[in-house]
Image: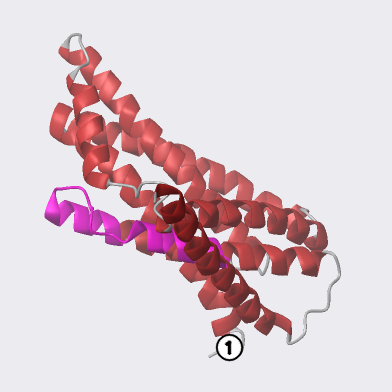
Amino acid sequence: MPADFWTVLFPAVAAAFLASVVEVVEAFTIVLAVALTRGWRPALAGTGAALALLAAVVALLGPSLQLVPIRLLQVAVGVLLLLFGMGWLRKAVLRAAGILALHDEEAAFAQETAALGRQAGGARTLEWIAGIAAFKAVLLEGLEVAFIVVAVGAGKGLLREAALGALGACLLVLAAGFLLRRPLARVPENALKFGVGVMLSAFGVFWTGEGLGADWPGGDLALVPLAALFLAAGLGLARLARAQAEGSAA
C-alpha cells in the first residue's frame, strides 16, 4: 500500500464518493418524482441527456488541466475547493444548530410531484416538461459532482481515482433507489455534507499552500491536522450557534 494512501488517495476518493452520494440522492428524488408522475420515458430521456452533457464537460475539462502549470493549478483549485468546502460546512453548521431546516427528501419529492401534477397541456407537452425537469436536476447536481471530482483529483493527479469514487456513489444510490422505488430520506445528508465540507476545506488550504510554495510540516500528513482543525471549528460553531438560538428563543 502506498505511503500516501491514507493522507492523499483515501481522502480524495472519500470526498468524491461522499459528495456524490449527497448530490445523486437529491437528483434521484427529482427523477423519481418525474418517473412516477409522468412515466419513465421522460425521466430516463432527461437523465440521459444530462449525463451525456456532463460526460462531454468532464472529457473536455480533464485533459485541459494538463496544460496548466501545476503550481497555478494547485492555487486555483485550492481556492475554489476552500470556497466550495466552506459553503458546504457553513450550511451544515447552521443545520446542525437548528437555524436552517434539514433537507427533507420526502418533502422535496412531494413538492416536485405536486408541481408536475399542476402542469397543463397535452401528453406530449407534459412529457417534454417532465423530461426538462429531470434534465435540469441531473445537470445541476452533476455539475457539482464533476467539479468536486476534477478539483480533488487535479491537485495530485488522482482524477481517475476520484472519478471512480463518484461512480461508485452513483451506482450505490441508483441501486438503492431502484430497489426501494422511493426517496432515500434515511441518508444522513447533513452529516455527509459536514464531513465533505471539512475534507474539501482541508484540501483547499493544503493545495493553495503548496501552490504558493509552502513547505508543509510532515508533507501530505499535514492534511490530517488541517481536517481536524476544520472539524473542531465546525462543531464548535454549531454548538455556539445552537446556544445563541436557544437563548434568543427563551
Residue 182 in view, yes or no: yes
> What residue appears at the point 81 percent right and 57 percent down from the top-left corner?
72
> What residue appears at the point 69 percent right and 49 percent down from the top-left corner?
64
> What residue appears at the point 58 percent right and 57 percent down from the top-left corner?
85
Q: Is 190 within the magenta? A: yes
Residue 163 in view, yes or no: no
* Quarter where residue 7 is shown: bottom right
In the image, 109 versus 77, the foreground residue is 109
**Secondary structure mostly seen in the magenta stretch:** helix
Q: Is 38 within the magenta? A: no
Question: As drawn, which residue projects farthest toward the top?
Answer: 121
At label 1, which amino acid type do we have? Answer: Pro
Relative to 30, is 138 on the left or the right?
A: right
Please, is residue 119 above or below residue 159 in the view? above
Residue bearing mark 1: 2
In the image, 178 versus 107, the foreground residue is 107
Question: As drawn, which residue projects farthest toward the right?
Answer: 213
* Quarter where residue 232 is shown: bottom right
Please, is residue 237 above or below residue 32 in the view? below
Tell me residue 92's x, y (percent): 46, 56
Relative to 164, is 37 on the left or the right?
A: left
SS type, badge 1: loop
Tell me residue 35's x, y (percent): 18, 35
Relative to 174, is 236 on the left or the right?
A: right
Q: Which residues are magenta?
A: 172-199
